[in-house]
Image (cartoon, grey):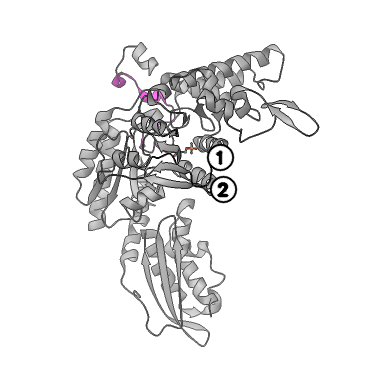
Amino acid sequence: MKAFLKNNQSKSDFDFHTQFPGLRRDVAYLDNAATTQMHQSAIDAMHAYIAGGRSNVGRGLYPMAEETMRRYDAGRSTVANFAGVDAGRCIFTKSVTEGLNAIAFGLRERLQPGDEILVSAFEHHANLLSWRRIAKERGAMVKTMPMTPSFTLDLDRAKAMMSDRTKIVAVTMMSNVLGTVLPIPDLADAAHCVGALIVVDAAQAAAHLPIDVVDLGADALVFGSHKCYGPAGIAATILSLDLIDSMEPMIVGGGMVDRVTADGATWRQGIEKFEGGSPNVEGAIGFAAALDSIAFPNQGLRSRLVTDLKSISGVTVFDPPGAVGIVSFTVDGMHPHDVADMLGQRGVCVRAGNHCAAPLVEKLSSTGTLRASLAMYNDERDIEALVSNLKEIVKKAKA
Amino acid sequence: MLLEYENLLALANRQHRRGPMVDASVSATAVNASCGDECTVWLKIVDGAIVDVSYEAKGCVISRASAAAIADAAIGPIGRIGPMSGKDTRVLLGVAVSPLRERCLTTPLKALQDAISKL
Ligand SMILES: Cc1ncc(COP(=O)(O)O)c(C=O)c1O
């Protein structure tokens, strides 16, 4: 965000095709909720590090290794600051999925038979299956906080579900299917009132909304690089200091041990405990550079997209109040995969199916939905490309 | 590719050979969870040969068109069915599909092969 404000330029002043070399002029890329195109600054930062001589971190004692350590630490600070915390609370994992699994693994010993984990109706499988597995192992239960008929979280019912049996509330901040924004601060207050922890999946939110962990009241929050214009293969897991002290690491091995004896080992303190194995240094450097350049997508664009899609006869649009960045829709009588395939042939990239959120999508449509998702570089032309091609496809199918 | 794809619509929507067969010798259903495709085939077998086929298919255009093409191609000695592969289905339809949609193409073939294996 800063890079844009610093130069005092509006978004339209930028030629996004130079900022994002992966953007193709013949393609309307509207699958940003899956992965965004990479920002040039991330490419440059990784290139400078790799081409300038790389090394492992935390192992070598020569100057080049020290320089790598400095860059890696600086990357961690930038990523942590983006989420409103300092570097001592930020762990790097390979993906949001791995981060959520690591949290579930680390918390499993806190669960007793009869305890409850609350998830929402909006969860991506990453924030559902990880909890189901530990619940099964510990004799605990996963319960779902429901959705209202207008596709938002039913906060009253969610709060009513919380009791002293609730140990963990694991919830997405923004639906990857509908763009619905969940009221994290309210859920955090309610969870803390019953003594539960709140774990936030910010995989989508990070590219669309401020994710200040302290303001949100989250005990743990995870977001990844590749949906925020950075490289794939790296994500940030932000934990409270208490969780950093008390959680068991999921991955053990080199880099995270303090002492290894003939038949035992002790872990390092702090975040190092959670980073077994050689870390993704170039990923951390690219992730940080991308976050330094991030801007949120233009909200007017989503409204325009919704209005234009609704104007096509036979198209049903799911438009929860307050949603950002993502729109799901269906076309009467047409399978979403067919429509996505035909749009793809015409240079429009959208996703179709259950979007790794099957329990939610089954409530919307038996065959899945089409999903258009926006990024900072999308503009009216992308919307026009989607809408005009969709109109043509629908017309031909009816003929 | 574009034109071919849209040409599949006619085949997918064809009514010929549609619906259950009351005096079928065998039937089987196959599903493709990723698209929600479902295909059932009914076969009438006489002296080791498929003499009549009907089917019901729901799901995406590729799977429904593939079901129609497979139903036509199935008529003949049952020994031909076992060795058929996704490649044969692609040739029948005259389309290339992305690897992600290979299952759409082959679900009707799987229903046909499952039916034969019940005999
Ligand atoms: C809400 C949400 N959570 C988790 C994930 C998983 O992210 P990753 O595939 O980077 O692990 C995604 C990615 O699609 C997502 O949208």
Quadrant the C terminus of chain A occupies = bottom left
Spatial distance from mark 2 to mark 1, Cα to Cα?
8 Å
Q: Which residues are magenta?
A: A8-37
Q: Position of residue B78 (x, y in %)?
A: 53, 79
Q: Are marks 2 and 1 on the same chain?
A: yes
Tag 2 residue: A137
Look at the image and tell me whether residue A356 can be seen.
no
Q: Position of residue A272 (x, y in %)?
A: 62, 24
* Residue sitting farthest toward the bottom: B47
Q: Which mark is residue A300?
A: none
Q: Which mark is residue A108?
A: 1
Q: Is residue B115 above or below residue A95?
A: below
Q: Quadrant of residue A17?
A: top left
Residue A240 painted magenta: no
| Count of residue discs | 2
The kind of residue on which mark 2 rests is Glu
The kind of residue on which mark 1 rests is Arg
